[in-house]
């Protein structure tokens, strides 16, 4: 068994794990990030970089280099409801440097953050390394057991952070209580080519029992078709041609390329879940991101919440980690800080799911009139600032503390790996 020691071991190389690893390493804290895959190249992951995340990159001095990478910029959220088009959110007034959502493949974002973190000697990224269990001694988590192609790993750490997603292995092993809030829908993801004459930007369409979202990705659309929870088997039984026809009915401009969906292998299921841990921590263990609170795809804010968790965790825990004395009180402080935005966001998502999405999915009637909230957005454009604020910034945006922004050369790095 390979044994290593570090200040902080992070399970999961997603947005929360990589951002936290970067920030801790920048603060001179020795950190190991475990990523179970050989690379970050995985499809149908959230690809939105929100204004609040772009602001964090600006604070870190990374924004200019980041925006040199290929991406698309969305300045408005728009949807076609029935036969009418309505602008749901306007990002031009958000109080951040970047007044747009950037769309970029998540693997590009993760590769960028990992490459930026590797400049610090206390950052260690282990690919093909999957956290399998927790090491517990005298009621405190002391590390993780993991596997990689070279064999078994035992990593001892002052703090273990579970950032391994909504199906978190470490969350399951921890015994922490999960509160399930439910979701009435699942999402089918697919790629369809983008052609001249298509709508100019990302767009949502709602009508006659169907939801369809198309996100511009250069020469193709990343598309989401929302279905009732658990309805995939019924949809597949009706045949691929029937599914293509349903897509064409809600997005007629896509009809000429639906033959690109050659089999069900071209259509990926996202099983939607909304839940959160009642308590995010145990002595020596902290859960963040989807491991602490799985978000609905409504608003596409899951990545935003995960990165905000990471920034708050670094702000609160960098100093205790550097001194080797992370207390339960420190972990409780982090949860208190992040619980309000989590609860508020999930409450809003559940309301939209249950009162809007469920109602549309259960109806086959054509929508002939806009719901009154959308009429208000049409009549008073300044109201569009509020949805943009919630989606783009969130309920409690985090900023990197000044102590983490000092040049790393001014610190004595704490290296404990062996």
Image (cartoon, rainbow, N blue to C red):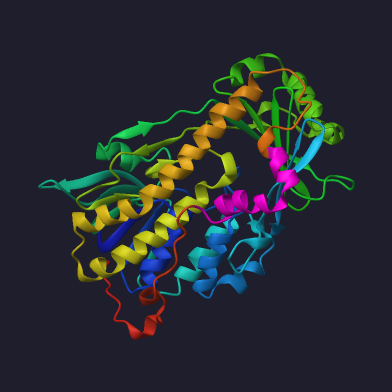
Q: Main secondary structure of the magenta part?
A: helix
Q: Is residue 216 above or below residue 418?
A: above
Viewer-proximal residue among 54 and 34:
54
Residue 45 visible to an observer of this rendering: no
Left or right of 381 in this view: 44: left
Q: Is 214 colored magenta in this rendering?
A: no
Q: Residue at x 30, y 39 (%)?
A: 278
Quarter of the image for residue 389 reads bottom right
Quarter of the image for residue 186 reads top right
Residue 395 visible to an observer of this rendering: yes
Q: Position of residue 153 (x, y in %)?
A: 29, 52
Q: Position of residue 94 (x, y in %)?
A: 61, 61
Viewer-proximal residue among 182 and 127:
182
Q: Residue at x 26, y 40 (%)?
A: 174
Left or right of 103 in this view: 168: left
Q: Is 389 colored magenta in this rendering?
A: yes
Q: Residue at x 75, y 44 (%)?
A: 378
Q: Is residue 212 above or below residue 398?
A: above
Q: Position of residue 65 (x, y in %)?
A: 61, 73
Q: Residue at x 67, y 50 (%)?
A: 384
């Amino acid at each position: 068994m390979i044994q290593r020691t570090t200040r902080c071991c992070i399970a999961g190389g997603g947005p929360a794990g990589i951002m936290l690893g970067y920030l801790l390493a920048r603060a001179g804290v020795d950190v190991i990030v475990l990523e179970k895959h050989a690379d970050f190249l995985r499809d149908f992951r959230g690809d939105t970089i929100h204004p609040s995340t772009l602001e964090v990159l600006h604070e870190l001095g990374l924004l200019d280099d980041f925006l040199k990478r290929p991406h698309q910029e969305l300045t408005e959220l728009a949807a076609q409801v029935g036969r009418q088009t309505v602008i749901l959110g306007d990002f031009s007034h958000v109080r951040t440097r970047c007044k747009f959502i950037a769309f970029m493949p998540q693997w590009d974002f993760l590769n960028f953050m990992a490459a930026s973190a590797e400049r610090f000697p206390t950052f260690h990224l282990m690919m093909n390394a999957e956290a399998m269990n927790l090491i517990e001694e005298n009621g405190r988590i002391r590390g993780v057991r993991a596997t990689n192609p070279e064999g078994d790993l035992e990593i001892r750490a002052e703090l273990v952070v579970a950032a391994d997603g909504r199906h978190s292995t470490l969350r399951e092993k921890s015994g922490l209580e999960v509160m399930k809030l439910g979701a009435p829908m699942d999402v089918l993801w697919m790629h369809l080519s983008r052609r001249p004459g298509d709508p100019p930007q990302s767009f949502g369409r709602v009508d006659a029992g169907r939801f369809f979202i198309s996100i511009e990705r250069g020469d193709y659309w990343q598309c989401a078709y929302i279905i009732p929870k658990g309805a995939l088997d019924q949809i597949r039984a009706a045949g691929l041609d029937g599914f293509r026809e349903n897509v064409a009915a809600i997005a007629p401009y896509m009809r000429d390329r639906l033959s690109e969906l050659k089999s069900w292998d071209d259509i990926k299921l996202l099983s939607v879940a909304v839940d959160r841990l009642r308590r995010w921590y145990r002595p020596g263990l902290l859960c963040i991101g989807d491991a602490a609170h799985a978000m609905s795809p409504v608003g596409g804010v899951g990545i935003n919440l995960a990165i905000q968790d990471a920034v708050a965790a670094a702000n609160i825990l960098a100093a205790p980690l550097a001194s080797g004395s992370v207390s339960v009180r420190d972990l409780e402080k982090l949860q208190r800080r992040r619980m309000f935005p989590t609860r508020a966001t999930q409450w809003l998502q559940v309301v939209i799911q249950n009162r809007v999405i469920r109602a549309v999915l259960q109806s086959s009637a054509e929508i002939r009139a806009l719901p009154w909230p959308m009429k208000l957005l049409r009549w008073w454009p300044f109201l569009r600032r509020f949805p943009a604020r919630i989606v783009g910034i969130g309920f409690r945006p985090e900023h990197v503390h000044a102590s983490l922004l000092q040049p790393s050369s001014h610190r004595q790095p704490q290296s404990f790996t062996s």
